[in-house]
Every structure is written in C-alpha cells, then in structure tokens.
Image (cartoon, rainbow, N blue to C red):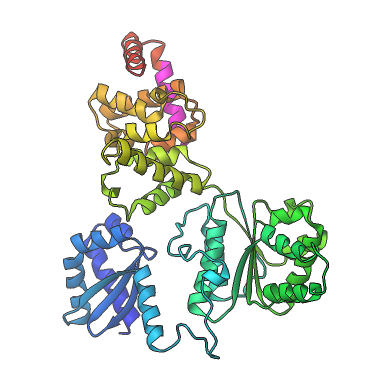
Amino acid sequence: MNDREVWNKFLDNIKNEITNVSFDTWFNEEDTKFYSFKDNIMTITVNQEFIRKHINEHYLDIMTDAINKVTNSNVTFNILLESEIKQLELEEKKKQNFIGLSIDGYEKQSATNANLNPNYTFETFIVGKSNKFAYKASRVIAEAPGSYNPLFLYGESGVGKTHLMHAIGNYLIENSDKKVLYITSDKFVDEYTRIFRYSDKNNFEKIDTFKEKYRNVDVLMIDDIQFLSTAPKGQEEFFNTFNELHDAGKQIIIASDRPVDDLNSFENRLITRFNWGLTANITTPDYDLRVSIIKNKLAFKEAASDIPDEVVEYIANNFDSDIRKLEGAITRVLAYSSMFNKGQITLDIAVDALKDQIKDRSIYKNDVQRIQRVVCDYYKISIDQMKGKNRNNEVNFPRQIAIYLCRELTTESFPKIGSYFGGRNHSTIISADKKIRQELNKNENLRQVIKDLKRDLT
C-alpha cells in the first residue's frame, strides 16, 4: 500500500471504533488531513489547536491501535497545526537555500513589500456557506494563477474580500517566485495623479517608474475598485495597466463592494473586461459561520475555555453583518471582563460591554437569551434542554412559551428567533408561537403563567 492507501484504511478502521458524529466532527477531511508517513511516524495536520488537544486527549490510543492493525508495525502519530507545517516547510527551504534568494540570485519578495498582511492566510480564513465559492476560487487562483483572469470578488464591507486577496498573495510569495502587489484603488489613483501635480523635467521619468511598478508584476490585486468611479484619469490608466497585464498572461484580482454591472460610473470597456474572468460573491456571514469565527478568534486566548456558549451566541446573533464588527465585539467583551469582572465572562457582562454598540436594543430585559433564562428557571429546565431536540412536553411546552414571549417582547424575526433555539427553522417557530396564542384564549392558568413571566422580565 502507498501512504495514501494506508491513511484511507486507517480512517476505515477508526470509523468502526467511534460514533459517526465523533468521526464527522474530529476526522472530517477539512479539519484533519494526512500529511506524511515516514520512519513509522504518521504526521497529520489539523486547522485548530482545540482539535489537536481533543484528539490527543480522547482518541490517540484508538488511533494508534487502528494504524498498527493496518501496518502491522508500531506507528506513532505526530499531530501538527497547519501553521506549524508551513514553518517546517520554510525551514526545509532554508536548508536548501531557497529562502531569501530566488533562482536567479535576487532577493525573494516578502509580504511587506507586496503590501500584504502576513496574518491573512487561507489557514486563518473561516469558510462557511456565504463565502465557500469565493474561497475555493481563490485557492484555484493561488495554486494556478491565470486559471480565471480576472478574478472579481464582491460583497459588502467586512465580509472577507481583503482577507482572501491577501491569502492568495501570501500563498504565492511562500510557494512560488511570482512577484505580487496588493493596492487599493484610491492609493493607485493618488500615486498616478501625484505625478501630474507638478510639471517638471522628471515627469516622464516618474510616469515610467509608475508603469514599471504596476505592470512589472505577475499578480496585481486592486481592492475597493468602486472608488475609481470618480477618477476618469485613474480609470484610463488602470484600463491600460489591465490590458498590458492580461495580454501578458499575468493574473489580475479585483475586489468591490458591489457587482460588476452595478459599477455605473465606470467606462463600458472596463466593465466588459471585469466580466472576462470569474466573479465570486461573498454574502454576509450566516449564524453558523459567525459562531465559527468567534470560536476561532477565541481559540488561542487564555480565557476562551471559560466563555459560556450563551455569550458566543449573544455576540453571533447581534453582530450579523460585518466580520470586523464581530471581531471588535469579541475584543471588547474580553477587555471589559478583565477591567470590571476579574476576567470572568458572563452573559450579563457581555450585554453590558456591548450595549452601546447594539442598535435597536434599548433594554436588555427583552433579549431572547434573557427570556430563555427566565423561562428555564421558572420550569426548572436547562438552556441546553430548551435548545435541544427533546420533544417531551416537559421541555417542549416551556420552549413554545419562550418562543411566544420572544415574539411578544422583542422585534426579532421568526428565522432569527429560530437561530437562538438550536437552529430551528422559521416554520417551527411560527407553529410554536401560534400554539401558545391559541392556548391563551382558553387556558386561564397559562395566562397567569405568562403574566408571571412577564413580571419577572420587567
């Protein structure tokens, strides 16, 4: 068997030893990957520290037995983060004198002189339904520049377009000798117009320098292209730059806050060229992706293990349009708890920390999570039971009451309320609300319960 066949056989054995849920959670092909099998050491990679920790603590013995059955030898596992693999590969390249020098002896480009943030990589990008296509398209471009030219990424501010552009650039710098340049459109225009601000004998020299900077690259990434709309001369120059790069087979990547056809102030010839390649939309992150982003941001923070799920859910539900604001909310909650609650994070602390940032939330008492807690206390059930799949009437009826109160006391939509109740769909939430309303018309005891609960929420 080759190494890949050994890995696949190992996975088959593991699958027979643990539950399907555990297998899909900890050994799925996106999170846990085969890297190498050498000298009876099997190296696998994971993308999060908490995954490595959990596998080491709960599955290592089972894994060792499974691999030894496949190989009939004593094999040990080496579980590394993907970032650590990158470091190992870099060190190996250094040994071979590939780092610091390119093939022809010139200094290799760095992320800094390409205007890239080295922290924005594919490994640090959290993938969900809203960005999966754009992510996969970006990976294709990174691994095979020119596959789609241009690549046009679009979506609202803060959804991850810039991160993907930097990830492409960082990948290429690390894995190839291609020359990469990232720039925003306003910076491009500013540099170009500055040449003509003063007329002097060096004007032609400056123009040549400008053209060389933007046309003597293998990959040009220009962000916030929509700001070129008010700069006709900038559009003209970018049109010429685009043509020269495209004709030479060089990759162009563009990001915008709107689709190509909505760039109304652009020349038609530019619009046509933007449509030559592949366009990929990134929409606002859904609830599950927001939760994943929050947990990922917290993974390496000392206080992460002490943060209740209800705090994560509160942040995810209230910052639902902009990843930057989501990250800012996390930072604020951590700082606020450190300053005012000795580092202990609770839902009350999170609400207090974020009250000035949450629009249309004048009073905390009517937040969904507050309602859930009050109802759970009243009926002596847990939050996990309320959010779970248990349909026993002792749990289901309080759940329906909580849903009804959420509709009565908050402005949340049915789908939004569903996200708080274990991701239930909107039809389930509508049905629960309707059932309680019908019951209230004929049940005096229920009317008193609702009255008591509303009093507790006052």
Q: Position of residue 311 (x, y in %)?
A: 35, 39
| Picture quarter with the N terminus | bottom left
Residue 362 versus residue 237 in the image, above or below: above
Which of the 4 quarters of the picture holds residue 222? bottom right
Between 107 and 260, the residue placed more toward the observer is: 107
Q: For the stretch drawn in magenta, what is the main secondary structure?
A: helix
Residue at 43% in and 17% down:
437
Residue at 28% in and 29% down:
395
Q: Is residue 308 left or right of residue 252?
A: left
Which of the 4 quarters of the picture holds residue 152? bottom right
Residue at 21% in and 64% down:
56
Which of the 4 quarters of the picture holds residue 329? top left
Residue 232 versus residue 340 in the image, above or below: below
Between 304 and 67, the residue placed more toward the observer is: 304
Between 180 and 381, the residue placed more toward the observer is: 180
Q: Is residue 167 left or right of residue 250?
A: left
Marks counted in the figure total 0
Residue at 40% in and 45% down:
330
Q: Position of residue 41 (x, y in %)?
A: 24, 80
- In the rendered image, residue 240 lying in the magenta stretch gets the answer no
Q: Is residue 437 left or right of residue 68?
A: right
| Picture quarter with the C terminus | top left
Q: Is residue 328 left or right of residue 54?
A: right
Between 22 and 233, the residue placed more toward the observer is: 233
Residue 278 versus residue 88 in the image, above or below: above
Q: Position of residue 84 (x, y in %)?
A: 34, 71
Q: Position of residue 228 (x, y in %)?
A: 74, 56
- In the rendered image, residue 433 lying in the magenta stretch gets the answer yes
Q: Tell me if I can see residue 139 in this picture.
A: no
Q: Which residues are magenta?
A: 424-438
